[in-house]
Image (cartoon, coloured by chain):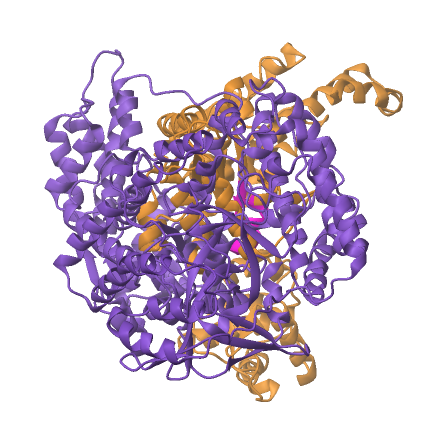
């Protein structure tokens, strides 16, 4: 399909690119971008889940038994964010649905705790996804109570051998535990423990203490199967993952290009600076999601003029992804605002983090103007207030009591939402920062 | 729709006619000859007198109870009447209906013989009189809607030919009904062979008839011998009184039928207590002979002459198939067996209501547009049934047995299971056939025909409303019109209101277990119903005897069952009910209804009313209305009422601030006429004391039972009994599991789950497919998986920065001496640790991300992240655990 699109665009592209070589490269790079982006944005599942073989086998077996033998099960997949819970489940479902026998039989219900925020919505969604008979079009009729009775009745009518098995997939399982009385969970788990229609209840959560959230009778009905996705990946494995994530598949149209690309990626892995960056990333976060983010940023820098991935690209991507969110805001402040922030920092040092108000900051600032400043003129008070309010709007400072108290603006207590290091770093990078301001910032007490 | 009728009912006032005919001083009763009923907005007063047939208000407003008035009396201004009951087909237990062996006539009633039935009724429930006649087969072609026919006797076990003397027109009720050994004696005097045969069938189907009436009473008395409750004594007395009746009646036989002048009085007196017969005789002599004014009250006030002619027309059509006509009391299978006549049926049914209110007919047709088309395939399907429809009812029965024995069994099972929970059914629109796949087809058709039948039933009731006042029939006619038009979008052929709740069937059947381990796993699944419940024998006994005694006595009571989850509370109660139902099936105990509600399966405590009502009567109502209806049902002296056993699971969820749901649940059983046994289940032993108000707790009473957690021996026994000689586990492995679970919770579900997991692990560990046993190592692995805390593993698997952050948290806690710190404080520590470890310090954003990740796993407890630097951090694991996990690293 992509090739056809390319053909349609051919005349235009011929105009743009004079040389055939460039056209070819452009075409190939488009392909590369597409393949890799699909990978990094989780649009395409990996062929097999990496590093989770035993868990995969367990889950697959469990679901298969529900689908084939009609045995009801319940299981929780627990793991930190980005550990691949959903990926694992989807891989298992994909493999399961390849079986013709399963594909014809299994019904799937996908719920998410973030979308179905209470049982009423969840019930409607279940009914809709199961296409029960009280659904017309996309609408579910009946009240909450009726829906519940209807669904339970439907499940009760089923039996192990004759009804189609249903997979209930509950993402953000912990949020369902906050529903009133945990009615939905109780009923789903109760069905899974009684001779009704075969169901598999699969919960996905990142909370390790999820079982403590369940009420005792709900907990008793849960089978206590937990699949933990806690990866104990070493850095070598991380490097391998980096390599394989960037590698082009064998069925890439231009084998020469793909070989070059893959060779380049392998070389990158050997490079010291790249390894350092990856080590830093690995130290802060082991999961694939952060790696994908890094690679995605690096990939965007690949272009016709720069057809291979370089160490510089990865370095830049790393810099971008680990940049402090407030640093950029600080770089955009005026010198006056920066001075106010330095004054606040000094106040924090003096009073050990106690809140301050505008007047205190203004005094501190005036002292600096009078004693040390050569380059900065005296600002009128309204101007300073204006600068102060701008900082307030940027939420670099925040009122202590939420800003509801009726104190005059100048005397309202504030806290600085910046760490010491952030201020100093911002000063270092600030373009054309006056030297006396810098010195003032470094000096211990005003 | 009938539910709304009650609201429109006119008020009736009752007054004794004349002076008391006799008086029973001992019981402080006075007996009267007749009673006049004045109805609001109706000028004429109706008078019912002793010996007449009356209609008595019941739960079902379309089919009021029928009875013969035997005595009228008042006890301290409370009016009571003694009656001889008649039952309609629809009042007979569903399982028993097929014993009739033919479809009953819509106007047919049965002489009712059941000693356990209370024959004392509040006079205020009398609606009016009705005509009842005895008919030898066949039923008359011309029928009057006001007249009911009696042909057979129903003694709760079998239908028998009615002894003509048993039933007498109001002029001469004489002969004693054959009591006690009726089924055995019965066949002798009836010469008609077909009747005999049919009766034989009736008896034969109940193969357990050896435990007939006598057996029951013996069992009952033996049972009650153990306990001497007041209710039982009363019961005994009542029985003795009834059993003494035959003799007295025989005496009455001597009187010639022409002596009708004092019939009512004589009957009334003789049916009274034996002690005061003489006194009564004296009174009788003194009383003036012809007191009775015999006016039959027509329930339909307006009987215009034009109607009789239309009646005739209609009935001539009806006569074509009137014996085969499925009626309001139709057996489920008849409609399928009498297919040759079926299409005609339809027309008849369309005609009938047309007579009453012609404006209604077109609408009805509209509402059931698919009816004929649905019917056609069904007719074809059954065309090859061995015996085509014939005139005699018996052969029809035979064909019924041959053709649709399976289906019927299925249906009756369904009906038993669901207890008619689908309340949508008594509405009009038939369900659309939705062909899922070829295998589904048959199932669907079945469902459809079921629906159709119900449609018919509801229509028929509409037809029988002719016996009602015009106002009533109009009122009830309004409801069906509303029903389809209100919600159904005109474009969609099927409205969701009539949807049948079902999960589609699978195209391929589920595979059977293939090896020993799979077999074991199937048996160990919590859902597989065990043959018996080991280790709960004592509890089973207690609950069984409690419920049984209540059913036997026809009284009510409550029981509170508590125990931690997974100790078999619900399973035991279900087991009890199962065996009681079996006993009822074999006529060892009276029939009863079992209803189950679960506090967790409803959205609101008040939904309990709705669910109970729906399961009891198939009516749908709002919570308030349902509460009112139930209140009425349980407080009204309703005759022929079976005991209702109500299981309330997860009772604590029915708690409301006013506790009115709980109050009602416990109050109803205490009513005299309720016959309600309530079994409640909850987890906490002291629930009554803890959350119930005194008045609720007091009504709950002291019948408590507590299920102790299983100990390891019991758990082992449970597993062994479930496995039932399937050799899959080593003995030691079983013991390990049961000991471990017993030590932790005693939850049998947990135990079974671990066993199942162990079989899985065993299966995966072994490559060769030979006979393998689940050993200790597998069990250990399963236990580890289920019981070990994952926190330590999680910490070990965390990234370096996350581990550092945890250390920083602990360092900060130590510095502060508190168990709480802001992110900013921890971050400073973290920076220091980074430098110590020789790592590049991370930015605040990254630090916050690390912190959030730990918070998402709940290794840390965090405030919402919008607080940024100021969010407070706490540990969710003990510091020792963290240090242990980090040190081992």
Q: Tell me, what hue is chain B?
A: purple
Q: Quadrant of residue B333?
A: top right
Residue B472 picture location, percent across and down: 67, 65
Q: B767 or B2, which is in the foreground? A: B2
Q: Residue at x 30, y 22 (%)?
A: B518
Residue A116 part of the magenta-drawn span: yes
Q: Residue at x 58, y 88 (%)?
A: A406
In the rendered view, would you say B137 is above or below B150?
Answer: above
Residue B597 picture location, percent across and down: 41, 55
Left or right position of A398 against B95: right
Q: Tell me, what hue is chain A?
A: orange
Residue A115 picture location, percent across and down: 57, 50
In the rendered view, would you say B180 is above or below B774?
Answer: below
Q: Quadrant of residue B661?
A: bottom left
In the rendered view, would you say A112 is above or below B506?
Answer: below
**Magenta residues?**
A110-126
Left or right position of B165 against B521: right
Q: B826 or B660, which is in the foreground? A: B660
Q: A44 or A339, which is in the foreground? A: A44
Do we see residue A79 in this rendering? no
In the rendered view, would you say A439 is above or below A347?
Answer: above
Left or right position of B833 against A119: left
Position of the N terminus of chain A, as image quadrant, is top right
Number of numbered callouts drawn? 0
Q: B456 or B347, which is in the foreground? A: B347
Residue B325 part of the magenta-drawn span: no
Residue B691 picture location, percent across and down: 31, 72
Do we see residue A357 in this rendering? yes
């Amino acid at each position: 399909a992509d090739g056809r699109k390319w053909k349609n665009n051919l005349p235009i592209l011929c105009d743009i690119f004079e040389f055939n070589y460039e056209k070819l490269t452009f075409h190939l790079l488009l392909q590369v971008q597409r393949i890799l982006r699909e990978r990094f944005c989780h649009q395409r599942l990996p062929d097999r889940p990496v590093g989770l073989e035993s868990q995969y086998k367990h889950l697959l077996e469990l679901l298969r038994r529900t689908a084939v033998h009609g045995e009801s099960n319940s299981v929780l997949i627990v793991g930190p964010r980005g550990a691949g819970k959903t990926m694992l489940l989807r891989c298992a479902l994909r493999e399961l649905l390849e079986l013709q026998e399963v594909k014809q039989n299994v019904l799937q219900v996908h719920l998410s705790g973030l979308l179905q925020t209470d049982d009423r919505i969840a019930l409607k969604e279940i009914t809709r996804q199961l296409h029960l008979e009280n659904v017309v079009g996309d609408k579910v009729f009946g009240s909450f109570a009726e829906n519940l009775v209807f669904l339970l009745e439907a499940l009760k009518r089923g039996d192990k051998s004759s009804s189609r098995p249903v997979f209930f997939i509950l993402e953000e399982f912990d949020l369902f535990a906050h529903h009133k009385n945990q009615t939905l969970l109780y009923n789903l788990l109760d069905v899974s423990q009684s001779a009704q229609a075969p169901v598999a209840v699969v919960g996905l959560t990142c909370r390790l203490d999820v079982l403590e959230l369940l009420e005792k009778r709900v907990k008793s009905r849960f089978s206590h199967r937990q699949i933990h996705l806690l990866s104990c990946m070493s850095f070598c494995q991380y490097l391998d993952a980096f390599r394989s994530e960037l590698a082009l598949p064998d069925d890439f149209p231009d084998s020469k290009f793909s070989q070059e690309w893959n060779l380049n990626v392998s070389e990158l892995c050997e490079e010291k600076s790249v390894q350092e960056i990856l080590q830093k990333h690995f130290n802060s976060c082991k999961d694939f999601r952060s790696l994908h983010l890094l690679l995605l940023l690096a990939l965007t820098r690949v272009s016709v003029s720069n057809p291979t991935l370089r160490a510089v690209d990865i370095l830049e991507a790393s810099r971008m992804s680990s940049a402090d969110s407030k640093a950029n805001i600080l770089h955009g402040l005026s010198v006056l605002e920066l001075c106010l922030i330095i004054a606040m920092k000094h106040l924090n040092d003096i009073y050990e983090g106690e809140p301050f108000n505008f007047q205190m900051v203004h005094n501190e600032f005036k002292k600096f103007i009078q004693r040390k400043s050569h380059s900065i003129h005296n600002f009128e008070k309204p101007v300073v207030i204006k600068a102060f309010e701008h900082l307030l709007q940027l939420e670099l400072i925040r009122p202590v009591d939420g800003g509801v108290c009726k104190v005059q603006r100048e005397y309202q207590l504030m806290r600085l939402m910046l760490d010491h290091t952030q201020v100093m770093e911002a000063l270092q990078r600030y373009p054309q920062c006056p030297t006396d301001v810098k010195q003032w910032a470094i000096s211990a007490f005003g | 729709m009938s539910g709304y009728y009650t609201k429109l009912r006119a008020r009736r006032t009752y007054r004794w006619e004349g002076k008391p005919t006799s008086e029973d001083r001992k019981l402080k009763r006075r007996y009267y000859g007749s009673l006049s009923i004045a109805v609001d907005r109706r000028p004429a007063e109706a008078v019912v007198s002793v010996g007449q047939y009356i209609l008595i208000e019941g739960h079902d407003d379309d089919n009021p109870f029928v009875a013969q008035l035997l005595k009228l009396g008042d006890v301290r201004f409370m009016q009571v009447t003694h009656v001889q009951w008649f039952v309609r087909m629809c009042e007979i237990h569903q399982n028993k209906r097929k014993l009739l062996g033919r479809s009953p006539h819509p106007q047919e009633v049965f002489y009712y013989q059941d000693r356990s039935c209370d024959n004392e009724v509040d006079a205020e429930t009398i609606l009016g009189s009705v005509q009842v006649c005895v008919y030898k087969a066949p039923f008359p072609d011309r029928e009057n809607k006001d007249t009911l026919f009696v042909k057979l006797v129903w003694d709760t076990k079998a239908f028998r030919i009615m002894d003509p003397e048993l039933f007498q027109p109001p002029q001469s009720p004489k002969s004693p009904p054959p009591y006690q050994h009726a089924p055995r004696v019965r066949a002798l005097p009836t010469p008609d062979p077909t009747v005999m045969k049919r009766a034989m069938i009736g008896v034969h189907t109940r193969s357990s008839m050896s435990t007939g009436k006598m057996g029951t009473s013996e069992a009952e008395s033996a049972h009650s011998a153990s306990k001497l409750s007041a209710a039982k004594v009363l019961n005994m007395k009542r029985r003795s009184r009834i059993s003494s009746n035959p003799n007295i009646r025989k005496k009455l036989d001597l009187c010639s039928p022409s002596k009708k002048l004092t019939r009512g009085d004589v009957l009334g007196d003789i049916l009274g207590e034996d002690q005061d017969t003489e006194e009564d005789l004296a009174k009788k002599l003194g009383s003036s002979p012809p007191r009775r004014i015999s006016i039959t009250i027509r329930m339909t006030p307006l009987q215009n002459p034009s109607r009789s002619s239309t009646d005739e027309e209609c009935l001539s059509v009806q006569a074509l198939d009137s014996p085969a006509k499925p009626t309001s009391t139709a057996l489920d299978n008849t409609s399928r067996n009498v297919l040759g006549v079926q299409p005609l049926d339809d027309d008849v049914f369309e005609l009938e209501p047309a007579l009453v209110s012609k404006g209604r007919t077109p609408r009805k047709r509209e509402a059931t547009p698919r009816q004929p088309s649905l019917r056609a395939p069904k007719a074809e399907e059954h065309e090859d049934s061995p015996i085509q429809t014939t005139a005699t009812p018996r052969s029809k029965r035979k064909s019924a047995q041959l053709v649709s024995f399976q289906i019927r069994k299925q249906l009756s099972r369904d009906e038993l299971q669901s207890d008619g929970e689908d309340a949508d059914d008594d509405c009009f629109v038939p369900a659309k056939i939705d062909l899922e796949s070829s295998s589904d087809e048959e199932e669907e058709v079945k469902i459809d025909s079921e629906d159709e039948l119900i449609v018919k039933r509801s229509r028929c009731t509409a037809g029988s409303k002719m016996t009602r006042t015009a106002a009533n029939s109009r009122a009830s006619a309004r409801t069906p019109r509303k029903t389809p038009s209100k919600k159904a979008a005109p474009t969609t052929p099927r409205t969701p209101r009539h949807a049948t709740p079902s999960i589609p069937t699978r195209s391929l059947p589920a595979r059977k277990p293939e090896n020993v381990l799979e077999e074991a796993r199937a048996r160990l699944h919590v859902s597989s119903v065990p043959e018996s419940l080991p280790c709960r024998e004592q509890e089973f006994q207690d609950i069984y005897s409690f419920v049984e005694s209540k059913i036997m006595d026809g009284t009510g009571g409550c029981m509170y069952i508590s125990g931690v989850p997974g100790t078999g509370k619900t399973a035991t109660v279900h087991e009890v009910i199962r065996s009681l139902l079996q006993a009822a099936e074999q006529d060892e105990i009276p029939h009863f209804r079992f209803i189950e509600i679960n506090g967790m399966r409803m959205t609101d405590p008040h939904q309990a009313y709705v669910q109970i009502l729906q399961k009891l009567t198939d009516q749908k109502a709002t919570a308030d209305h349902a509460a009112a209806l139930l209140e009425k049902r349980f407080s009204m002296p309703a005759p022929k009422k079976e005991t209702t056993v109500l299981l309330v699971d997860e009772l604590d969820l029915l708690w409301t601030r006013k506790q009115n749901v709980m109050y009602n649940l416990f109050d109803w059983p205490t009513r005299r006429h309720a016959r309600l046994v309530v079994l409640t289940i909850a987890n906490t032993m002291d629930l009554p004391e803890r959350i119930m108000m005194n008045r609720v707790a007091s009504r709950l009473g002291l019948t408590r039972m507590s299920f102790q957690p299983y100990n390891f021996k019991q758990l082992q026994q449970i597993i062994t009994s479930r496995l039932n000689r399937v050799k899959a586990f080593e003995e030691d492995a079983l013991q390990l599991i049961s000991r471990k679970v017993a030590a932790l919770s005693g939850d049998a579900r947990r135990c079974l789950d671990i066993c199942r997991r162990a079989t899985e692990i065993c299966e995966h560990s072994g490559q060769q497919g030979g006979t393998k046993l689940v050993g200790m190592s597998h069990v250990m692995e399963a236990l580890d998986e289920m019981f070990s805390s994952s926190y330590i593993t999680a910490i070990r698997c965390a990234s370096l920065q996350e581990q550092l952050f945890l250390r920083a948290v602990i360092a900060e806690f130590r510095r502060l001496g508190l168990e709480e710190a802001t992110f900013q404080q921890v971050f400073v520590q973290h920076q220091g640790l980074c430098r110590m470890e020789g790592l590049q310090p991370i930015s605040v954003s990254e630090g916050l991300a690390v912190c959030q990740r730990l918070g998402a796993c709940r290794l840390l407890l965090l405030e919402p992240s919008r607080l940024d630097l100021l969010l407070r951090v706490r540990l969710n694991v003990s510091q020792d655990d963290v240090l242990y996990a980090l040190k081992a690293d």
